[in-house]
Image (tube, rainbow, N blue to C red):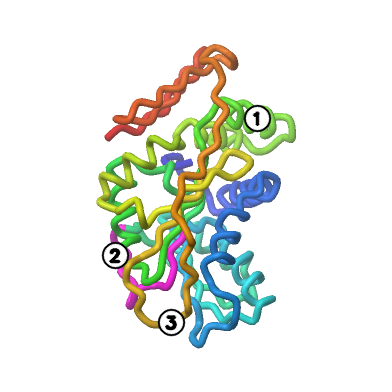
Amino acid sequence: MDTEPLSSVAFHAYLCDLTVINICTLAYRPTLQWLRRTLIAGQPQQPVSVIDIGSGGGDMLRRIWKWAGKRKINTDLVGVDLNPWSKQSAEKMTSGMPIRFETSDIFDFHPDRRADFIISSLFAHHLTDDEVIRFIRWMDAHAVHGWFINDLHRHPLPYAFIKCFTRLFGFNRLVQHDAPLSVARAFVMADWRRLLMAAGIPMERIRITWFFPFRYGIACQCTDTGSGPRVGVPATFTDGQRSWLLPSGALGVALFQKPSARRLRISGESMTATAST
């Protein structure tokens, strides 16, 4: 999907299938949980501004808008995606909600002011390691209070599950190809520690949490308190990893977790996903 040209209709169908998968795999929970814990109870004086990078069809922002509305929290929500069809699909599915969508390469996107919070969901694994480092620095420079990355844990179990799941339930061919590839291009704990260190982010500002089923949440508290909504400070920033690693031959999968690169080779197939520094 990153390179194959699609019509607007095909891309919209692709995003709809991804939304179904996100619902089934509890994809929204890590980000919403972080927002709940970060915003102190009570209504902020000003609208809470959130930028979602790699917003796709806008499903994460729609859920944030509904969540905030139930708590009477005013929001200023913006989604940014490189693909021009994303804006068209997102606006179609977000009718009646005050959410804006922009088409831009993130590194060319310069908002008028910094956002209270910047989030991304299932975006980072599309980047090379150098781009992830640059993206982390971009978020840290453009967020007032904090940023959050919600992405996959590279592991044989979710790879095998999503490959079977998408085929068994007849998702379109792009989803069947991209879903397991996304797991193969994802991260383990050592990757995040290395990337955050390379980006120059102090680990005392970071909390890395493992979420079922096989996701990592990377939460960062920014040092600039600024003005706007009050922000709850976590009591501790701890390593929340939990992992069950299988023998390399258990599913025909060899995991390479060297600190210098992230790679998953799928034996018996021609596909090899690599993102090196």
Mark 1 lies on residue:
161
Q: Give the label, 1 or 3, closer to the camera.
A: 3
Residue for point 54% across, 78% down: 75
Query: Could you tell me which secondary element the residue under label 1 belongs to?
Result: helix
Q: Is 59 located above or below residue 254 in the figure? A: below
Q: Mark 2 and mark 1: span between their CA atoms?
A: 37 Å
- Choose between 25 and 179: the one closer to the eye: 25
Query: Could you tell me which secondary element the residue under label 3 belongs to?
Result: loop
What residue range appears in magenta?
107-119
Q: Is residue 81 left or right of residue 164?
A: left
- Choose between 237 and 85: the one closer to the eye: 237
Residue for point 28% across, 51% down: 134
In the rendered structure, which amino acid carries the disc numbered 2? Ala
- Choose between 273 and 244: the one closer to the eye: 244
Mark 2 lies on residue:
141
In the rendered structure, which amino acid carries the disc numbered 1? Phe
Query: Could you tell me which secondary element the residue under label 2 belongs to?
Result: helix
Mark 3 lies on residue:
228
Crowding at label 2, few (<14), some or many (≥20) Cα neighbours within 10 Å? few
